[in-house]
Image (cartoon, rainbow, N blue to C red):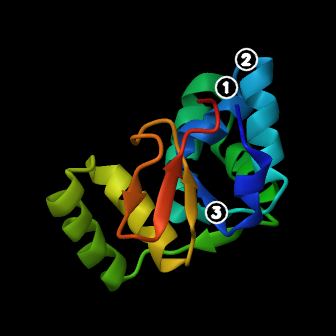
Amino acid sequence: MMQTTMIEKQFALDTNILIYLEGNDPAKRKIAESLLSLDPVIPSQVIFEFINVTRRLRNIPKRQLIKEAADLFRHCSIAPVYHSTLVLAENLVQKYDFQLFDSFIVASAFEAGCDILYSEDIQHNMTVREQIRIINPFY
């Protein structure tokens, strides 16, 4: 389960953590809510993935979905994608063999100065570029 000492640093959330806000697992939902309440960095790729998955899960109108996402992330820092993010993502794919979209998420978190990326999809306790530690909060 989530270690509260880890969240004192600047951190980002991966899509797979946020999807538990929509799920039926109360323990994982509570952890996701707790992390989101701390105003994390949200890579823009995560927003797009979250909206896409949520649309399939809930089948709600697009405008409502965008409004709900805007409300959900209103206190978070949104990490944009720059040209440098693309270059870094390519380097991460080469060095760590990340999945395509994971490379954008990690690159965005790195450029935002995050120390931690909470994710279920990337190896738990992995350190990327000697800066970002990947933590599975459900581990």
The secondary element bearing badge 2 is classed as: loop
Residue 54: x and y in percent read 61, 34
The secondary element bearing badge 3 is classed as: strand
Q: Is residue 136 above or below residue 117?
A: above
Q: Is residue 28 left or right of residue 47?
A: right
User: Mark 3 belongs to which amino acid?
Assistant: Phe
Residue at screen point 71% across, 62% down? 40
Circle nearer the viewer, 1 or 3: 3
Residue at screen point 69% across, 22% down? 23
Mark 2 to mark 1 CA distance (whole Å): 16 Å
Circle nearer the viewer, 3 or 2: 3
Circle nearer the viewer, 2 or 1: 2
Residue at screen point 46% across, 40% down? 124
Residue 58 marker = 1
**Toward which corner of the image does residue 56 lie, by quadrant?**
top right
Mark 3 to mark 2 CA distance (whole Å): 23 Å
Which label's residue is closer to the chain start, 3 or 2? 3
Which label's residue is closer to the chain start, 1 or 3? 3
The residue to which callout 2 is attached is 25
- Tell me if label 3 and label 2 are in contact, CB under 8 Å: no
Is disc 2 surrounded by few (<14), some (14 to 19) or many (20+) residues within 10 Å? few
Residue 98: x and y in percent read 26, 50
Q: Is residue 60 above or below residue 104?
A: above
Is disc 3 surrounded by few (<14), some (14 to 19) or many (20+) residues within 10 Å? many
Mark 1 to mark 3 CA distance (whole Å): 28 Å
Q: Is residue 49 above or below residue 41?
A: above
Name, please, the residue furthest toward the top.
24
Residue 22 marker = none
The secondary element bearing badge 1 is classed as: helix
The residue to which callout 3 is attached is 11
